[in-house]
Amino acid sequence: MASLGMYWNTGIKKRALTVANFAKENEKRVDVAEKVKYSKVVILGGTGRVGGSTATALSKLCPDLHIIIAGRNREKGAAMVSKLGKNSEFAEVNIDDREALEANLTDADIVVHAAGPFQQSENCKVLEAAIATKTAYLDVCDDTSYATRAKSYMNKALEANIPAITTGGIYPGVSNVMAAELVRTAKLESEGELERLRFYYYTAGTGGAGPTILATSFLLLGEDVVAYNKGEKIKLTPYSGMLTIDFGLGIGKKDVYFLNLPEVKSVHEVLGVPTVSARFGTDPFFWNWGMIAMRNLLPQEFLRDRSKVQQLVQLFDPVVRAVDGTAGEAVSMRVDLECSDGHNRIGIFTHKRLSRSVGISTAAFVLAILEGSTKPGVWFPEEPEGIAVEAREILLQRASQGTINFIMNKAPWMRFDRSSVEHGASMHPRLEDRFVYIIFTY
């Protein structure tokens, strides 16, 4: 059981809640309403790394859920069901088969679309099936075009009275909610204007996520990077603009590069931050060099062709797997917010295993939707209709299970480790690395 400490700061106008959570490596069961715990969850792409991780996390967080592993590989499906236990089953489903999709969603409470990659996808058939069957929807999309297309179904989702979230994984997803909390807190505490928000992401190797993240990375090299500078939309070269960023405890300083990610556009529009960008980097360092070389040597048309990119993934996959064995699969997200009066704050989220953390993060969104934290319509995670403001704290607590470092609303000049002084609340523990430090201000 996690131990919790709460500290009250009377030096500011609003209440600040500080929670120190000693995270366990294994997910702990969460308390949910009776109507939620027996829900039926369909996970498309459930035999893949992200979908399988989500199913595993859900089965641990809420063991009474009925989980349907939906995919094309019956053998892998049987193996996953064997791992999950009696409350799970496999359904052979192709996401391009609208009839099969609707048949499997008819009596489901929520469908999780984890069958990526989403880049260069030409339709939203899973969302269409969810609307047709009045089933709640969540996807782990990391593509700007797909997310924008999903949002165009807003009126249909409203008519069907179903809640839907797009880009609801770890990044984008949890990172969006972190950004929303930084902005909300800044508006309470700062008299200045929001100026700049920057997302920095790091993953060791493929993070244990396998071919899907590799394909996603290659496809993103074929897209111009969209960023915003003082309210103006600008286009940048993918995997350019290198910065060395300190991710703090367990990660340290890493090089990161521009990528075209959907949270940049959504945060700019939803949270009203005039300057927004996202960068990503990986290890070993020569993978970053390889990404730059591919960007320079391969035609953009090649990198936008899903079939050709899949062939490239198959070619590189054995090498990537070999390197992953030594690189590890750590993941870290850093979100920086700057205001005109110098009220600058950051959030950091670090886990030793992306393959586990992505599932826990996605599962946190699933539970939030089932609990009624999402209104009918299609929403981004940072929208209050997507994840209600009062539900963000519990979502971040659930998503951060197992993290080695989780910090919110910390001044950038402070040390990014477990000894800190934040908003007048002093904590100087002498602890092992598995420490989580969370600040929420109301």
Image (tube, grey):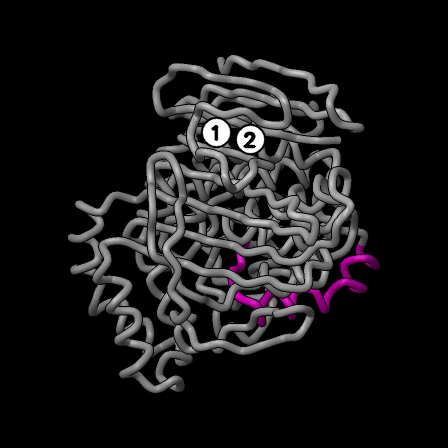
- The residue at the point 30 percent across, 69 percent down is 291
Q: Nearer the viewer, residue 78 or 21?
A: 21
Query: What residue is disc 2 on?
Result: 398
**Which label belongs to residue 425?**
none
* In-image side of 20 versus 266 (left or right): left
Which range of residues does the magenta coloring cover?
A: 140-160
- The residue at the point 58 percent across, 27 percent down is 422
Q: CA distance from mark 2 to mark 1?
A: 6 Å
Which quadrant is the C terminus positioned in?
A: top right
Instruction: Confirm whether the magenta stretch covers residue 242.
Output: no
x%, y% of residue 403? 43, 32
x%, y% of residue 247? 40, 43
Label 1 is placed on what type of residue? Gln
Asked if the residue under mark 1 is in contact with the one under mark 2, i.e. CB atoms within 8 Å, the reply is yes
Q: Nearer the viewer, residue 221 or 58?
A: 221
Label 1 crowding class (10 Å Cα cut-off): few <14, some 14-19, many 20+?
many
